[in-house]
Image: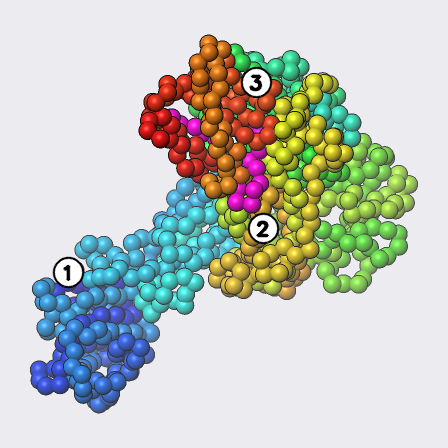
Amino acid sequence: MPLPSISPTAVGSPVYTVHQSKGLVADLRLDVGSTAPFPFFALRFPADADIVQVTLIRGTESVELPSAPGSDDMTLGNRRVLAEAMEDGTDIVLGVEVRAASAPAVGEVWSVRAQAGSPQAQWQFTQSDNAPGDLTITRIMCDPLAGFTIGGPAGVGQQMTLTALPARGTTTDPTVVGIPAPTTAYRWSKSGAVTIPDFPGCSTSPQSVFTMPVVYAPKTIEITEEVWFETGCPGPVGMLSSTSAPQTLTIEAGPRHLALVLDRSGSMSGPRWQNATTAAQILGNLYVAMRTGINPADRIEQLVFEDTSCSWHPIPDPLIQPVLAASDPDTADGLICDLEYGPAGSCTPIGDGLIRAIDDLAALPAQADAEYTIVLLTDGYENSGSVWVSPSTPLPAGTSGILSFAVARQTGAARQRVNQRLSLYTIGLGATVQEDVLDSLAAQSQGVYRHVVEVSQIADAMAQMAAASHSAERVPSTPDPGTPPGRLVTLDPRVNRMAAAVLWTDPTHTIELAWRDAGSTGPFTVVPTAVKQCPTHGFATIDLASLFGGEESVPATQWRIRHQDAAGGALPLADSDLLVFVDLFVRVQVVFDRAVYGTGDPMTLTARVRAGDDPVTSATVKVELARPGESLGTFLAVNGARYQPSQPTGPDPDAPKARMLTDLLRAHEMEDGLPVQTPGVVFEDGTNELFDDGAHHDGEAGNGDYANRYVELDKEGTYTWRFTIEGETPDGSSFSRVLTVSRWVGITPDPENSPVQVDQVESPQGRLLTRIMVYPRDRNGEFLGPFRPEDVHFASSACPFQPAAEQDGEPDSDGVRYPCRDGGTVLSRYDGGYSRVLDCPEGTPCTVTITVRGVHLPPINLGGEG
């Protein structure tokens, strides 16, 4: 179809022709006098054009000009406007003269805006005084060019990019001639009843991205772009606008591979290990439930990791191996309940476990649309292995052949292939886990981090991770008021599959599932269901699409779930013993406005709620927060001045930071960990809700994005958010969801509050050396704390730092020494200080700079005069 354009393409022409546009805007700069000659312009357009409106604007005032044959004499402030429209063949020609009743002016700014109800083959605008060296038409615009391309790998979980064609046209066919370039807005829409929570809406960028969703069969969506000039986002749509032809995109049910990486170190023994293995089996059941019959290439693996040498060494421990080798869903289904995970054993090689999982995923047949997911569960700090995850992990002196995880995951083409399409989900269990590391691993790999304190929460956390990675969500339940006891869940229409796990201690028990229409008070219909009777839980799946004759036919339903004994008698069923997940017609995606947070930062949380093609605008999003009551770094630093490490004990001895934390918690009778607060009021507006009203950092009102801002990130540690979302889909059906996500917050150093000490120490050779010591703190006095050497960098302009091979005059009993790339060391002190030693001869000018978490402290000038 013909596209909008303007000719000629350069400024300075007395006549411009606009093609295939609903209208035009001509910006003028006129010399308006009280005596002739008076400025004059003319507009020509087809006589049969529908609903033509022409407006003349000066400043904040405007008048409507005639668009049908006739004349008018109007005033606009102290200006007289004479307008006459007449027929000329098949066109209307509108001529306009502007006179000054008083206060004549040179270069006065005017604008003519003309619009019809549909695109016209041709408009013509004339201002005969316009010339290249004396512009009276400074800019002329018509409808923008609409059209776009779709790019990116089409696999599930991948980022697809929508790129709009240049709205201002091309050099040969522009839609804007002159300056300034107008603000351009792009709005994307889709149809096809496929829920994509991050599908873009309105943006001033010509590029937008969205994540390809999980589907159970190939789905086709149509995407359309609307583009307009001047008004920006969220709108309203500008007068000059265009809509593209729709483009189709087919979303395939591509293969998805899942690896569970389970910490089997000694600290996991007891109830932790029992709950972890139960959760691992539930995760496997859930994967099977959601992926059976989807793609024959789907694979699931579960592996355990430990290190029997409890040391750093180049070769991984052979005990890092699968307990469930990569299996298709049908094969895994017959194995999961009988998996043998072995006893919790020795040390914690987190990096080795992750690399083994990546290698096992890489060994699967390469497929262009394959997606990879790793779920990691660990309860401690790494303390052994051949791959280290955290730069803060102290490696013993002389250690060689050890790789960082950041490097190892990119080593070799096969690992790179997996890494490029990998989502990494992390779960930290207990009071002494590497929270910052687990948060960073997830944030950098399209995953989610969750901190779990109670052992009983492991199953929920692990199942949520598997569900999130495979586009399912947990549904809350309510007590069944009937007799015998049970629990009720309400499902929205078009749910494809539902899975329910019931925790128990007797594998002869079973699960009964029954349904009725949502909102009904009639009897339930029991659905015969095959129940997986594992030793510690039961698992049942319902294929609602098959039950109701197709996904499109699935109504809103209420389900009753009963825990029954071997004889069919109903048993009590607590909320904590029931996990229910559904695939997603209604989807909720929680996003944060930053990948990394520090103290003092505001944190904006957004829940994108979608149902098929439609944003859900009638939801209530309640939020609960568990936040640190005391900063980890401050707790360690304040209590570290006289700290002496305990001797490592047990089969899984703590890493230095974990040992210090454990020692100090025990000394302060705080075995449950640092205090956790649950504030009654969460957000800056005094509420505990996210809103979709355009006034809570949520963008355009009524777009299905619910947001609010939290402004009390004042402690280092993990902030865990629990979202309860309830509402109605656009067709009036009720739904509810529960999500829990954790984010770690570090210290934002304040140069004015981070004291630096400079003193002298004596080397073993008797030379006086210069020691620089810094105590990084934020503006509220919270310490970075010890064991974070990767966050503290020293640089010297002239004098060398003391080599690691030489004793630098500081006792190692004050902290832990870490090697530096320049060959020296930095001492991380237990009291929160970080120090390095310079070999700087007296009088030598030298400047030392210290950078803490990207923040530069004032330079330290040594030697020379003064």
Which residue is at the far front?
866
Is residue 112 found left or right of 460 in the rendered image? left
Pointer 1 residue: 10
As measured in the structure, the alpha-carbon distance from the residue carrying label 1 to the one carrying label 2 is 54 Å
User: Would you say the residues marked 2 and 3 are in contact, meaning their CB atoms lie under 8 Å apart?
Assistant: no
Identity of the amino acid at label 2? Glu
Which residue is at the far top?
765
Residue drawn at point x = 29 percent, y = 62 percent: 182
User: Would you say the residues marked 3 and 1 are in contact, meaning their CB atoms lie under 8 Å apart?
Assistant: no
Region of the chain picked out in magenta, as a range: 778-797
Is residue 450 found left or right of 123 in the rendered image? right
Q: Quadrant of the C terminus?
A: top left
Dominant SS in magenta = loop
Q: Earlier in the sequence, mark 3 or mark 1?
A: 1
User: Which mark is in front, 2 or 3?
Assistant: 3
Identity of the amino acid at label 3? Pro
Identity of the amino acid at label 1? Ala
Q: Quadrant of the N terminus?
A: bottom left
User: Which mark is in front, 1 or 2?
Assistant: 2
Q: Earlier in the sequence, mark 2 or mark 3?
A: 2
Q: Earlier in the sequence, mark 1 or mark 2?
A: 1
User: Which mark is in front, 3 or 1?
Assistant: 3
Residue count near mark 3 (Cα–Cα under 10 Å), binned few <14, some 14–19, many ≥20: few
Pointer 2 residue: 712
In the picture, the disc for residue 811 is 3
Q: Nearer the viewer, residue 14 or 547?
A: 14
Visible residue check, residue 596? no
At mark 2, the secondary structure is: loop
